[in-house]
Image (cartoon, grey):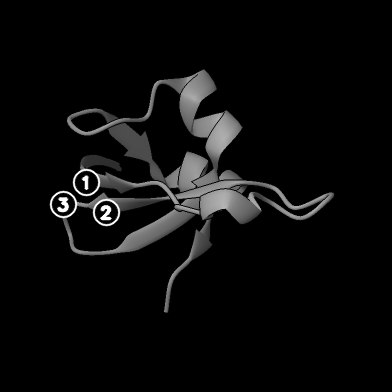
Amino acid sequence: MRYLITDLLEPDNGCEGFLPGEEPMVTLTLEDGRKIKVPDREAYRRGWDIGSHITDEEINEYSKEDK
């Protein structure tokens, strides 16, 4: 199944930035209300943005679901 991405939130780490080895993540909000965290580099590489779609397979491969 494919899900519409309705919102995308990027973390604001301020002047501290990211810790060494920490992978920047973005949160995608899907049309069914789920919030999925995915690596920022994968979201950019795959073109995941507001209005695009993500599949169940991609969610399972790349995400960490917010509880």
Q: Judge left or right: residue 42 versus residue 53.
A: right
Query: Which residue type does callout 1 highlight?
Result: Asp
Residue 36 picture location, percent across and down: 41, 57
Given residues 45 and 4, the one toward you in this image is 45
Tag 3's secondary structure?
loop
- Quickly name the residue at label 1: 7
Given residues 40 and 2, the one toward you in this image is 40
Cα separation between marks 1 and 3: 9 Å
What residue sits 28% from the left and 64% below the top? 34
Query: Which residue type does callout 3 highlight?
Result: Glu
Cα separation between marks 3 and 2: 7 Å
Given residues 21 and 43, the one toward you in this image is 21
What residue sits 30% from the left and 43% below the top? 1
Q: Which mark is residue 29?
A: 2
Q: Which mark is residue 31?
A: 3
Q: Earlier in the sequence, mark 1 or mark 3?
A: 1
What residue sits 42% from the left and 79% below the top? 67
Query: Which residue type does callout 2 highlight?
Result: Thr
Tag 1's secondary structure?
strand
Asked if the residues shown at circle 2 and circle 1 are in contact, with their CB atoms under 8 angstroms apart, the answer is yes
